Every structure is written in C-alpha cells, then in structure tokens.
Amino acid sequence: MKVFGSSGTRGVANEELTPGFVLRVAKAAGTAWGSGADGGAECIALARDTRYTGRMLADAAASGLASTGTDVDRLGIVPTPGAQAYAEREGVPVMVITASHNPPQYNGVKLVGPNGVELSVATLEGIEEILLTESFAVAPWDETGRVREVEGVRRAYVDQLLEAVDRENIADADLTVALDPGHGAGALTSPDFFRELGCRVVTVNGQADGHFPGRDPEPVPDNLEDLGRLVRATDADVGIAHDGDADRAIFFDENGEYVEGDATLAALAAAELEADDVTVSAVNVSQRLVDVVTEVGADLELTPIGSTNIITRIQELAANGERIPIAGEGNGGVFFPEYRLSRDGAYTAARFLELVAERPASEVVAPYGGYANVRRNVEYESTAERDAMLDAAANQANTSDAELNTRDGYRLDYGDAWVLARPSGTEPLVRIYAEAREADRAEELAGDMCDALTEAKVNA
Ligand code: MG
C-alpha cells in the first residue's frame, strides 16, 4: 500500500496532508463504501480528534463524501474508540480525522468499517486503487449527500463504557485517579467516565486543545513528568495517560513511577488468560508476555508490527474457534476482542483499575518488572550487505536451540529470552533487540547476533 500504512495515512497538516488530499480520500471512501456501491452504506459518519487542523480537514472530508451521493453524520470531537463504538452501534462506516500520537502539526485519516473495526489491508487497497485512479462516484446535484451534526456521541460512548466494566468493584475501592488526557479527545470523555465509575479524578493537560500546550500527544515518559508529579502531589492510587485519540492508556503506580506498557500488558494478560486461550502480539513482544503465556499454558501468536496485522490475525483465529480474550502491544494499545476488536484507552484503563481495586498498582505490575532490554544497530551500504546479514540472522536460529519466527525480521525465542533482527523501514540499518530477565543474558544474545551480522557484512 502506498497511501495507507498500518495505521491509516498521516502527515504534516496543510503540507503533506492537505484539504485537497483529504477530499480525495473521502471521495474514494464514499465511492467504495457509499450508497452507490454494492451493498453500500446510505450514510458515512465523520469524527475527529482535537487537533487544530481537524475542523478544516473534516470539512473537506464532509464535502468529498457528500459529492459521491452519500449522507454524512458529523460526530464532532470523539476518541477513536468512541467513533468505533458509534460505527458498531449504528452499523455505519466512520472516517476519523486523527494523527493519534503524532506531534501537533500532524493530522491523518483512519477508516473504520460498519462493524467498528479498522479496515483490513485488503479493503484499504481497494479504496487506494479508487484514489490513485481517481475513479470517483459523482452524484447529480440533487442526489448529493445531506450533511448533519449528530449530538451526544461522547455521552453515548461513556454510557457504553460504564456498562462494559465492573463498576461496583471499582467504586467500592474508593480510588483516586490522576488523569492526563494530553489535551486530546479523551479530555472530553475520560474525566466523566472515571468519575462516574466512582473514582476521585484529578487532571493535568485536561482541556481539549489542538495546540497541545502542556505536552505532545505521545504518552512516553519524557512527556509525562507532570503526571508523575500529580500522582505524588494528590496521593493518587494510579496515573493514567492517553494519546491524542485516546485508544491507548499508559499508567503510573501509586508512587508516581512510570509503568512500562509491556508490564501493564503482561499484568492484564495474566488476569485474563486461561489454559488453551490464544493471545496475539507483534514480533517485538516482551518476554514479560511470553512468560505469562507459558505460565498459564496459553498460546502466543506473533504478527508483523502494527495494529492492522494484529486485528487480521485475531479475526483469523476467532474464525477457527479460538478464544482470544486479550491481545496487543507494549505501547499501551490493548485489545479485548470480546469487548470490541479495537483498542480503547478508557476501557483498558478501567480493566487496570479492576486490578488496582484489589491491590496497589505497584504490586499489580511488580511480577513483570526487572526485565533487561538491549538494542543495537548494524548499518549497511548495499542490498547485498543487507541480504547477507539477514541470512546470517536466519543461520543463528539454525545453529542454536531457538525457535525462529520470520513474520517481520528474524525473531529467535530461547524460552527464557529472545533476540530480534529486523531491517529498519526508514534507514539503511538492521535493528537488533534482545530481552531477558538478566541483563547479562540480553547483552550476550544481542552481542552474538551483532557479531554474526557484522561478520556476514564484511564477507558480503
Ligand atoms: Mg492512538
């Protein structure tokens, strides 16, 4: 795919991602999905996050959709999972104007099907084909779509969340939640949600603001120091941070310490998985989740990196009758497929609160701390060098007792530890990742892989 990557299409607003481009994406989506298409939708919904350029780009999208003859329901500012909940409830596709965790100057487009699930690669390729060949449906003037504003979508999303979680258990624990929605779409839904769950809520960066004055939308430790301080200052039980469209949740414990997303995923998985269940993650999955899966007697399936790949694999496994109660990556994006096949930051946070209701957050994640991660890069100058290095990575698997996974680079699982060699998508280098409980072990595996690749490069 050229236009749509594994998480939609994104770029700097008004430079790469212009109103003209969004108009054409909307015309393509309207052509593929709309009332002119076989079994198409009478109406397509349109949502956005808080970005300053969101309204400008959503206006272009509304025009493009309506020009194909399809009605447009404008939902306003809604977290992406709220837009997905709307799609599922109303059975209509949704076009979401969001750049998720990217910096403020970015914007983008995500496309959600009428089942509330992000579109598959195959469906996106069909839309891309229409876009690149400009074979757009054009409605006669008196059959162009009607555009209307829909009220109350955020409220309906919060109500649906409240229905989906163990409200009583959380309320009984009398928790204080320090919340950092990062000026994103979650600022308009998560404070109400946690309050109505019976928590005391204190916020930082709690105003919806498309300039993101307090912090950038990505919930990484450097952007979240204020949240750690807020947890300590208010004696909160937990800190919760979202990205710009609130499909992710990152946590701080009651001491104001940042919790690795991999540790949270492992803790949630340990609470959720039973023997013979399957969970799905990407090839850079942490040993923390591997250990949980081994302990429980469940299966772990690995996909190439990117949420679209995880969604596709979950659908395949579910079609085969497998139970997949949880899946996701260590970046705070977690799927609970029995709830909905989408990442939902507020829902994920509530599931974590269910655990914090039982014992302090630091104890919830303690079993999944203390793993050592090592990263190395090996540069190359020609494809011959790169290919020789990748052959050497495969060979490392043949000459050891590791289990090899080649879905995205070369991942060698040793049971107690793993190493991954994966060519960068953007730079001429192969990245090496290793993880183990002991730092020495991770260093050894990364070092061995690094040596093998370097030797192959020299001999190429
Ligand atoms: Mg996001």
Image (tube, rainbow, N blue to C red):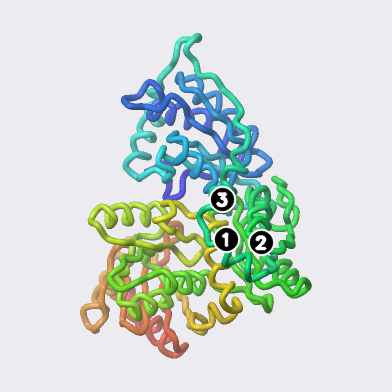
Residue 378 visible within the image:
no
Q: Earlier in the sequence, mark 2 or mark 3?
A: 3
Q: Residue 107, image x and y in percent?
A: 58, 43
**Residue 402 against residue 159 in the figure, above or below:** below
Closest to the observer, 229 or 220: 229
Label 2, label 1: how far apart the Cα atoms are: 8 Å
**Residue 280 against residue 121 in the figure, above or below:** below
Label 2, label 3: how far apart the Cα atoms are: 28 Å
**Residue extending furthest right?**
233
Which residue is at 54% across, 78% downward?
Answer: 364
Report if the beta carbon of the residue with label 2 is closer than 8 angstroms to ligand 1: no
Asked if disc 2 and disc 1 are in contact, CB closer than 8 Å, the reply is yes
List the residue tagged with mark 2.
198
Which residue is at 23% across, 56% downward?
Answer: 320
Q: Earlier in the sequence, mark 2 or mark 1?
A: 1
Amino acid type, mark 3: Ser
Q: Residue 335, image x and y in percent?
A: 44, 58
Which residue is at 65% across, 38% downward?
Answer: 53
Secondary structure type for disc 1: helix
List the residue tagged with mark 3.
100
Q: Residue 409, image x and y in percent?
A: 33, 65
**Quadrant containing the C terminus in the rendered view:** bottom left
